[in-house]
Amino acid sequence: MGNVAGSAVEERREAAVLPGYERLGGAAPVVYPPGLRERAAEARDVLAAGSAALSEILGVEPPDLEALLVADADWGRAPRENERPYPPGLPYFTRAARPPVLVLPETLSSVFRPRTAATGALVLWHELAHAFLLREPLPRTPAWLRELVPQALSAAVARRTGLLLERHLEKIDREPGFTARSFGRHADADGQMAFQNLLLAFGDAAVEEFGEGFLRALAHALWEETDVVGEERAQALLADSLGPGGREWLASRPEF
Ligand SMILES: [Zn+2]
């Protein structure tokens, strides 16, 4: 979810391959533990579809990366930027290995809600979108913009691939008691999930209204920013990327 650190730490590069793990080749290679070959093949297909779609939407080549499906028992040995393991069950993208790695848990944390046929793919595409966005240095932005872009991209990929996104969105609480911009950063795991879900529904509504083209404009605008992007600048970047009527549309959205 939000575990994307910017610093490249080199010393853990050997950790990308865990003992006994094998590799499934392809456009998006997946390294996996004994017994999880089928899961690895599923992840490879979901990532390949996501990678092709994100590459077209953003107008950039896919980043150099591989996925590492980690058995629950090995979670503490997955590559990461911090000394201590991350909470179990949360996928993340890290550049603490060469090539950078999308770390995927054997068991997805129960924090991820709602659980529908779309959940697993949406989570993978969210992390993959972070990896695409980090091809170029990104400025610091408010949390809502940092997480809105991958959530809207994930929704756009779902729309392209015919995933049952609508049935997933139907199960999301549309009035969690905060808006994208008022959300407090110190929320617990359930609060973070509600925040991500709000952004997924909001991002999907923006794609519905303006088409997926605004995501390419927004990503490229962010790559061109050199300073910290403050609240006002973040809103202007989003409104400009949406195009004509963007400002008015944002003002009309209660969840924003
Ligand atoms: Zn995220």
Image (cartoon, rainbow, N blue to C red):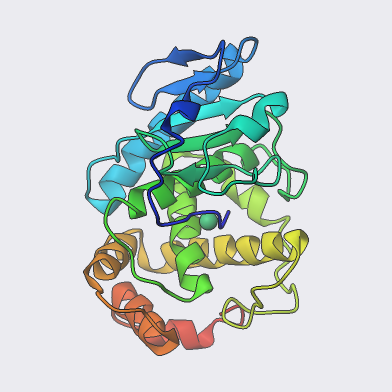
- Asked whether residue 63 appears in the rendered view, the answer is yes
Q: Residue at x 71, y 28 (%)?
A: 72
Q: Residue at x 56, y 10 (%)?
A: 20
**Residue 214 location, x and y as percent?**
32, 66
Residue 30 horizontal side relative to residue 195, left or right = left
| Residue closer to the observer: 21 or 147 | 21
Residue 150 horizontal side relative to residue 185, left or right = left
User: Is 222 rendered above or below residue 166?
Assistant: below
User: Is 249 rendered above or below residue 210?
Assistant: below
Q: How many marks?
A: 0
**Residue 77 location, x and y as percent?**
61, 31
- Asked whether residue 158 appears in the rendered view, the answer is no
| Residue closer to the observer: 219 or 14 | 14
* Quarter of the image that includes the C terminus: bottom right
Residue 63 horizontal side relative to residue 50, left or right = left
**Residue 217 location, x and y as percent?**
26, 66
Residue 49 horizontal side relative to residue 202, left or right = left
Q: Residue furthest front?
A: 11
Task: Specify the quadrant of the image occupied by residue 100.
Answer: top left
Task: Specify the quadrant of the image occupied by residue 139.
Answer: bottom left
User: Is 146 rendered above or below residue 108?
Assistant: below
| Residue closer to the observer: 161 or 223 | 223
Q: Residue at x 54, y 45 (%)?
A: 92
Q: Residue at x 55, y 45 (%)?
A: 122
**Residue 48 location, x and y as percent?**
39, 30
